[in-house]
Image (spheres, rainbow, N blue to C red):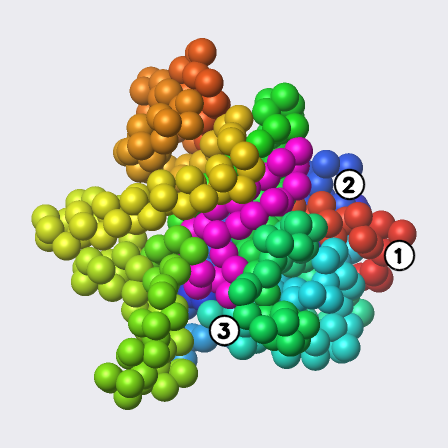
């Protein structure tokens, strides 16, 4: 019986998972997601063609990330039906300065990643929860950490610096960038879809509940809107994006907010949710009659367009703009508004190509000076590739 690879991608309220054959190309066996953790937990499992295999729900009370991990692992064990497991790959949001490549996990790696939790408080603890659960329950299975920051570690030094006294930079206070696994996958797909564009200057817009832009030249990250933490840059579902630091000082002085209160504000109560007062979900805002919902959508799009200008400046012009992520892949109106606002960069929209659809495709007109594309991302497959590559010379016993 052939071996398989499992991938776990833990977020703040969800746990995505996928299982692949440990074979060239990592063929997908099945994938799923357990979302609504702490609110309305629901697991949906699909086969390689996207057909539903299973759906389950649980009461919210007492159902935390540990419970979600337990249910997902049980589901995977039942579905692989005795196949040996080569290893488990994990998305880990923050690798700090130390981890610029995927790494096999041991106790020292877990301890080092725990120290980075303050830099990604919304994600890092949840990324580590399934890692520790597997290390305790099945220590014989190899685990690999794949980092969202790694893709950006090769940025020019100037793109990683803040204008703070040098001692802070030397202590690790710098721009790291995130969504790197998504950007790495999109860059690899672009080499297959449009090789000439992939070797040029491209801005990739990862737009979803978490949102960022990355300036990529010849497949390498040159700049990103996210910086020291994953709250920087674009407005997001519940995250504020960039703020004048003076705003935080004012909130401390005028409202008596401490560090934890500010953290809760900028990570969980701002963005689309905070501005609209309605929802963090773009789909709900699109259908809401509340004028604040429309204002939130407008602000989100404005911030994206403004930061595209910043990324274009970092690249010295662009050859293409690529949309990915939940909003980027599925919200045709958002893409239209953004592309039309970026005509000054040479982008001309093909309205027919921009209609809703799941496939990777060019959505700019023939003759457009710069190309616009939609390229669905697949972080789990990127993690599977890294895991297979790292473990291929020393497979784990099942």
Residue 66 vs residue 324, the one in the foreground: 324
The disc at residue 394 is 1
| Residue 226 on the magenta span | yes
Question: Where is mark 3, residue-wise?
Answer: 121
Q: Which residue is mark 2?
A: 23
Q: Identify the residue at image location x=56%, y=56%.
A: 177
At which x and y percent is residue 99? 72, 63
Whichever of callouts 3 and 1 sits on the residue coming sooner in the sequence is 3
Which quadrant is the C terminus positioned in?
Answer: bottom right
Q: Secondary structure at mark 1?
A: loop
**Discs 3/2, front:** 3
Lateral position of residue 349 relative to residue 254, left or right: right
In the rendered image, residue 264, in percent from the top left (x then y), is placed at 36, 76
From the viewer's side, name the closer residue of 371 and 41.
Answer: 371
x and y percent of residue 50 in the render?
49, 38
Mark 3: few, some, or many residues within 10 Å (few <14, many ≥20)? some
CA distance for labels 2 and 1? 15 Å
- The answer to whether residue 352 is visible is yes
Q: Secondary structure at mark 3?
A: loop
Badge 1 crowding class, 10 Å Cα cut-off, few under 14, some 14 to 19, many 20 or more, is few
Q: Secondary structure at mark 2?
A: loop
**Residue 302: image x %, image y %?**
29, 44
- Locate residue 352 relative to residue 48 in the image: left or right: left
Q: Which residues are magenta?
A: 209-232
Circles 3 and 1: CB distance less than 8 Å? no
| Closer to us: 151 or 21 | 151
Q: CA distance from mark 3 to mark 2?
A: 35 Å
Please give the name of the residue rendered at 40% of the width and 24% of the height, measured from the top-left corner: 347
Which one is earlier in the sequence, the residue at label 2 or at label 1?
Answer: 2
């Amino acid at each position: 019986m052939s071996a398989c690879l499992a991938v776990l991608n833990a977020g703040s309220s969800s746990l995505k998972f996928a299982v692949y054959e440990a074979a060239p190309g990592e063929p997908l066996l099945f994938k799923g997601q357990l979302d609504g953790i702490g609110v309305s937990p629901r697991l949906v499992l699909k086969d390689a063609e996207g057909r539903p295999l299973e759906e389950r729900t649980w009461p919210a009370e007492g159902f935390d990330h540990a419970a979600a991990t337990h249910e997902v692992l049980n589901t995977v064990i039942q579905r692989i039906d005795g196949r040996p497991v080569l290893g488990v790959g994990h998305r880990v949001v923050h690798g700090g300065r130390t981890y610029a490549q995927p790494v096999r996990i041991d106790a020292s790696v877990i301890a080092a990643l725990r120290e980075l939790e303050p830099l990604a408080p919304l994600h890092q603890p949840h990324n580590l929860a399934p890692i520790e659960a597997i290390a305790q329950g099945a220590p014989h299975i190899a685990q690999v950490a794949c980092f969202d920051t790694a893709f950006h570690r090769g940025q020019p030094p100037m793109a990683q610096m803040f204008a703070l006294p040098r001692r802070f930079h030397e202590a690790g206070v710098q721009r790291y960038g995130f969504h790197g696994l998504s950007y790495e996958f999109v860059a690899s797909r672009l080499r297959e879809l449009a090789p000439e564009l992939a070797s040029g200057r491209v801005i990739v817009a990862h737009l979803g509940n978490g949102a960022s832009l990355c300036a990529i030249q010849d497949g390498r990250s040159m700049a990103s809107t996210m910086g020291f933490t994953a709250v920087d840059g674009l407005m997001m579902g519940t995250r504020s994006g960039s703020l004048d630091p003076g705003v935080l000082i004012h909130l401390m002085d005028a409202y008596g907010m401490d560090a934890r209160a500010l953290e809760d504000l900028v990570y969980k109560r701002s963005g689309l949710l905070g501005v609209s007062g309605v929802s963090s979900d773009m789909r709900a805002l699109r259908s809401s009659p509340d004028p604040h919902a429309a204002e939130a959508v407008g602000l989100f799009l404005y911030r994206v367009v403004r930061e595209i200008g910043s990324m274009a400046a970092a690249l010295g012009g662009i050859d293409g703009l690529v949309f990915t992520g939940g909003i980027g892949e599925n919200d045709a109106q958002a893409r239209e508004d953004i592309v039309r606002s970026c005509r000054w960069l040479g982008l001309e929209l093909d309205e027919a190509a921009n209609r809703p659809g799941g496939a990777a495709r060019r959505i700019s007109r023939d003759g457009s000076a710069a190309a616009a594309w939609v390229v669905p991302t697949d972080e789990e497959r990127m993690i599977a590739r890294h895991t297979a590559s790292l473990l291929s010379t020393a497979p784990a016993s099942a």
